[in-house]
Image: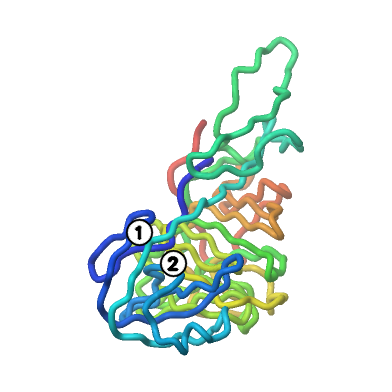
Amino acid sequence: MIQCRRKEIGGIITMKTLKPAESCTCTGSFLYGLKQIGTICFAFLFSAFSTNLLAVTQNPNIPASATSASCDNATLETYSGTSNLQANWEPNPIKLHWYNADTQLDVQDAADSCDYDGGLTVPSTAPTKTGYTFNGWKVKKIFVPEGYTQYEYLTFSGTQYIGTDWTPNQNTEIQAKYKVTATSACWVYGSGSSNPRITAYFSTGASNQRFGAQTIVRQIPANQINEVIQNKEGLRLNGVVTPYPTVANFTSSGKLFIGTAAASSSTAKFKGSIYYMRVYDAGSLRFNLVPAKRNSDNVYGLYDSVSGTFFTNLGSGTFSVGPEVTE
């Protein structure tokens, strides 16, 4: 789906919602960490009761010792008092891919991403087919070839998992849409049982989301559809960004799994539904995974439209699916 919208760095401060560029003077206890953005060292402020990112400001009213600290400092400090905060928004580029039927086009004169309120350049040369007239571009919904059926979501009951046989690194970006229905801890996806690794972890308490050797605490909501973008800059969960401290170059301790963190994991497997999962490697699409059924044997799994690989269950039990996707 092509979406062009803003990426929010901001949120609720003492029950006040900050709109783009809006500011407030807020009193309370805050956690803050420093991070380099361009040539400016920003202080990211957090609520004293949650490490979800709330606001970012260039010159917060915090102790002078903090402003002299090294940027990208992984240590969170506490400040109690009044701080002048401003909600800052920046464009959220959405990666685009152009197709002629099921063939991805290598076009040089068209946009490969779009920003909120930005213009969109389409290929100057339209696809052709004898006896037909090109009627314009549309959003691609079906990513599976003949012999497969695509579905809205794939449901895991807590015993299934999928392995990709691919090892993530510091340039990996994961985009996913999923719903957790578990009532106890489980892995949505992961790339190893020890750091460095990339994980999405659900827990009813504090939940550690890992990227390389870095960890942020961010709880994944249950029983609702969550949209996630996770990369070395941070974790964007349902429109709210929590930054990671500086991420060093790494190779994950294991392959990327969906529904667990490692093949050897015997517990804490995912219970919920995957709507899609896209994995980028240094900006290039590595996997575009959609829920599907192989019609020849009625087996469910995730179909990768990039490689044409159908990933099936490596665990026990069987997947179930949602409604069929149609054009």
Q: 176 left or right of 111?
A: left
Q: Could you tell me the amino acid type at mark 1?
A: Gln
State if disc 1 and disc 2 touch (CB < 8 Å): no
Q: Nearer the viewer, residue 64 or 299?
A: 64
The residue identified by callout 1 is 224
Please give the label number shown on residue 271.
2
Please tell me in which quadrant of the rendered image residue 123 appears: top right
Q: Secondary structure at mark 1?
A: loop
Q: Is residue 192 above or below residue 290?
A: below
Report crowding for label 1: few under 14, some 14 to 19, many 20 or more residues within 10 A (C-alpha). Answer: few
Residue at screen point 57% across, 72% down: 36
Task: Describe the colour scheme in one phrase.
Answer: rainbow
Q: Nearer the viewer, residue 165 or 10?
A: 10
Can residue 188 be spotted in the picture? yes
Residue at screen point 68% across, 63% down: 164
Q: Nearer the viewer, residue 13 or 273?
A: 13
